[in-house]
Amino acid sequence: MEKESLKYGKVYGFTNENVSSFKDLYDFDNADVLTVLGSGDQYFTSILNGAKNVDVYDINRCAWFHFVLKFMAIRVLSFYDFYDFFVNKKMDNMDTYVKISRYLPNDVRTFFKELIKTNRKFSSIIMSRYIGNGLLDFENGRIIPYFDETNYYKLQEKLRNIELPKIFFYGVEDLPDVINKKYDIMLLSNVFHYLSLDEMQYREFLEKFPVDTFQALYTWELYNGSDKRFINAGFTMDLVDSVIINPKSKNDYVLSLRK
């Protein structure tokens, strides 16, 4: 079995995918979900949509520290304070951080203490193009559901009644040898683009997982007939509203595989 990843790298502040669209594509109600961690927004979306349990995976340990900070922030902050801290201030507001820090596990608090000790801004761990850059539409929960104020407080209530999720610090290619339970849904974001597989090989890879339904790929463009190759390999394709404000194309693409 592969060893757990010890990678520490920059993280996604928020998803650049229309995860609000997932509620109409997948049945999260009482589902057991396995999702890429990334920004954490696939996790929060799954919980908000009624999943009973959500486990996460990521090779980047900084993604976990950022996620736990966001998880605890949603638990304790008002909608407006959360938005101000993560979007307007890009996490660089120590008064707000202090309000959250008392709820953080020791390892996460130690990570952020080290940033403070070395005079690094918290925003330094974020990939800048994925937070508050004006390209993504954060308003009204159109692409990220908890940016709707009502949904935010629904999510807050749910998070107050659950513990932090189980995390697998492995790349997706190692997960078939690591997970030991069945899942109803697996969310893979756009990891297909980072695997050296064609569409049929990708299907064969996903079939190694004890999972019923895969969100197999979120993509903003399809090139060189890849849409036909995915369909021929047994995937289904849905068009969803684009994440970009005033885009050239009004749609993004979600590829799914159902066993």
Image: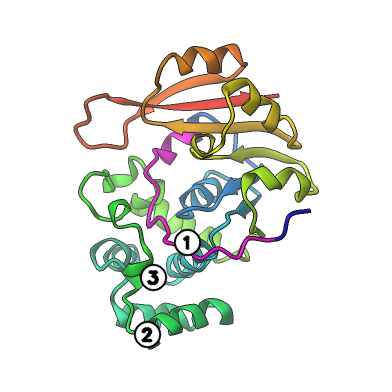
Residue occupying the point 58% across, 45% down: 50
Residue marked by disc 2: 118
**Is 179 situated left or right of 28 in this image?**
right
Helix, strand, or loop for circle 1? Answer: helix
With respect to residue 125, does 12 lie above or below?
Answer: above
> Magenta part mainly helix, strand or loop?
loop
With respect to residue 192, does 54 lie above or below?
Answer: below
Q: Is residue 103 visible?
A: no
State the extent of the magenta-drawn residues as a range. Answer: 4-22
With respect to residue 170, does 71 lie above or below?
Answer: below
Residue 14 at what x, y percent from top left? 38, 53
Residue marked by disc 3: 77
With respect to residue 219, does 231 lie above or below?
Answer: above
Residue marked by disc 1: 156
Q: Residues within 10 Å of mark 3 (few under 14, many from 20)?
A: some
User: How far separated are the C-alphas under marks 3 and 2?
Assistant: 27 Å
Residue 37 at what x, y percent from top left? 54, 53
Q: Quadrant of residue 221?
A: top left
Residue occupying the point 49% across, 20% down: 237
